[in-house]
Amino acid sequence: MSANYEIPKSLGSNFITDFIDEDLANGVNTRIQTRFPPEPNGYLHIGHAKAICISAFIARKYGGIFNLRMDDTNPAKEDEEYVDAIQEDLRWLGFDWKELFYASSYFDFLFECAIKLIKNGKAYVDELSADEIREHRGTLTEPGKNSPWRERPMEETLDLFLRMEKGEFPNGRMVLRAKIDMSHPNMNMRDPVIYRIAHIPHHQTGDRWCIYPMYDFAHPLSDAVENVTYSLCSLEFENNRPLYNWFVNEISFEEPPRQIEFARLNLNYSISSKRKNLRMVQEGIVSGWDDPRMITLCGMRRRGYPPEAIIDFVGRVGVAKAYSVVDYGLLEACVRDNLNENAPRAMAVLRPLKVIIENYPEG
């Protein structure tokens, strides 16, 4: 699962392991399985290193399973280049995985799950535009409004969804939405879109599909079908947890995974957004994803940062719930500490000068 790294103390004992210990003691779980689920739409950066370390080291601590899954549900932004780069970066960092999965491998299963929701009256085909859906969603202080298509008969919704899958409609013509609660205080629960039309080839499935599941729909069900026990993710997904649980419960998995969030790694004076990094690459602001000025893992590798220093850095940052920004100097200190112990050293006289000592006493 990982190279000969000793598990950093902060990654082997924290609030996440407290939850796991409690679940094991209460018989909620008898096994541990985690995963790292990146979307292959860019290269990994220092923030991903924290997520990798947490999931991999927790699985190792409990003798569990750590897998890698590409959450490839958006073919417009994903590419096989990123799939290969993610695997290379994980191996350079010193981690391996038991199985490599793709969310796209579950497209047939996810399609059947959507049909199940439709038949149970928990999903409907909506013909509102994206802007209209946004307007109907309401605000944090005002409830949303029901779509005029919300009470569409199940038979009609099922027929339209099957026709969507056959490619009868253009992009944006209609979507499939979960029927939850448009007045829910959590806006993620206000009838989220779970399928959209996209006539775009996929890097794994080719032209097989012209409808694709949304991330919030595919992600929890992929976890559940893989028998993941703990979905460990950054704090920005905390508001998605009720929706995560809703999908898993509606599809009726016997052993649903548990989502636990931790604070993401924010490094000052750095850009970690894949969207912004991609723009810098495309506009030639940097020489590529591995530009040494980037905080991508391949950029740091090219700069000469040892992977062990990155693991040390993540361990020093620790695992917490509170938002914080880490100073870049801490990362540099970890690199210096590692190189001080491991960098090869040599001394040489490049321009020797012959010296004759005349006053040195004989004998």
Image (tube, rainbow, N blue to C red):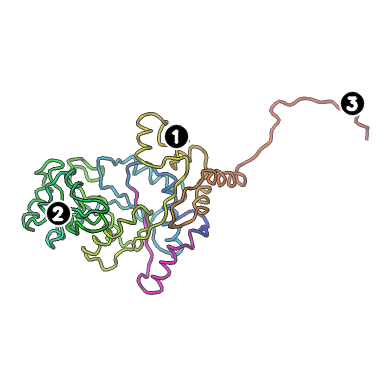
| 2 and 3 marks in contact (CB < 8 Å) | no
**N-terminal of the two: label 1 or label 3?**
1
**Image location (x, y in percent) of residue 75:** 25, 42
Residue 146, labelled with which disc?
A: 2
18 and 180: which one is in front?
180
Secondary element under disc 1, as helix, strand or loop, is loop
Q: Position of residue 263 (x, y in %)?
A: 42, 54
Q: The C terminus is located in which quarter?
A: top right
The residue carrying pointer 1 sits among few (fewer than 14), some (14 to 19) or many (20 or more) residues within 10 Å by Cα, namely some
> Does 35 appear in magenta?
yes
- Magenta stretch, residue numbers: 11-38
Q: Is residue 338 visible?
A: yes
Q: Earlier in the sequence, mark 1 or mark 2?
A: 2
Q: Which residue is mark 1?
A: 291
Q: Is residue 23 above or below residue 55?
A: below
How far apart, in angstroms, are the residues tagged by discs 1 and 2? 48 Å
Q: Position of residue 53 (x, y in %)?
A: 45, 54
Q: Quadrant of the N terminus?
A: bottom left
The 10 Å Cα crowd at callout 3, few under 14, some 14 to 19, many 20 or more, is few
Q: Nearer the viewer, mark 1 or mark 3?
A: 1
Q: Is residue 328 placed above or below 20 in the rendered structure?
A: above
Query: Residue drawn at (15%, 48%), measured in percent from left and top?
Result: 175
Using the image, determine if residue 85 lies above or below residue 351: below
- Identify the residue position indicated by label 3 in the image: 358
Q: Amino acid at mark 3?
A: Glu
Of badges 2 and 3, the one in the foreground is 2
Q: Whole-Å distance between the Cαs marked 1 and 3?
A: 56 Å
Q: Is 306 left, or right, of 255 in this rendering?
A: right
Circle 3 SS class: loop
Tell whether position 18 is magenta. Answer: yes
312 vs 341, left or right, is left
Identity, as a three-letter code, of the amino acid under mark 1: Asp
